[in-house]
Image (tube, rainbow, N blue to C red):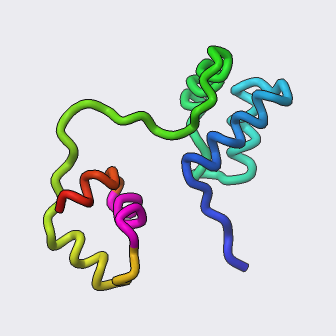
Amino acid sequence: MPSFEPNKRHLRELLIYFFNVKKSADEAHRLLGEAYGEAALSERSCREWFQKFKNGEFDVEDKERSGRPKVYEDAELEALLNEDSCQTQKELALTLGATQQAISHQ
């Protein structure tokens, strides 16, 4: 049976649920750890997100950061496309840990 691998958005949305049902950040971290093990967010991240929720910030997407985006060699992208030529820029960006914008400029 395949196991579900959560992404950051999924975990952060679960944190909103825990926040709304009045769980503490520590308890939310424990529950995520029980369900997802190593894939769970750190205790510190849980506390930081709970603080954002307390401040009324419920957007779980990563904010754009300043600074120069990482430059990827065409070979890295080509290798990924050789594996599956139907991948979208968004999927490639997720695989490389990059922004979609960084991928589209290659």
Say which quarter of the image contains residue 30. Answer: top right
Q: Seen from this angle, which residue lies furthest right? A: 21
Residue 63 in the figure: left or right of residue 52:
left
- State the count of labels: 0
Residue 60 in the figure: left or right of residue 100:
right
Say which quarter of the image contains residue 11. Answer: top right
For the C terminus, the quadrant is: bottom left
Q: Does 26 sit above or below residue 51?
A: below
Q: Which residues are drawn in magenta? A: 88-96
For the N terminus, the quadrant is: bottom right
Say which quarter of the image contains residue 17. Answer: top right
* Residue 92 shown in magenta: yes
Q: Does 54 sit above or below residue 18?
A: above
Query: What residue is drawn where x is 76% and y is 28%?
Result: 19
Q: Does 68 sit above or below residue 89?
A: above
Measured as percent of width and height from the top left, residue 66 is found at 26, 30
Measured as percent of width and height from the top left, residue 104 is found at 25, 60
Residue 12 in the figure: left or right of residue 97:
right
Measured as percent of width and height from the top left, residue 72 is found at 18, 59
Q: Seen from this angle, which residue lies furthest top? A: 55
- Provide the major secondary structure of the magenta segment: helix
* Residue 83 shown in magenta: no
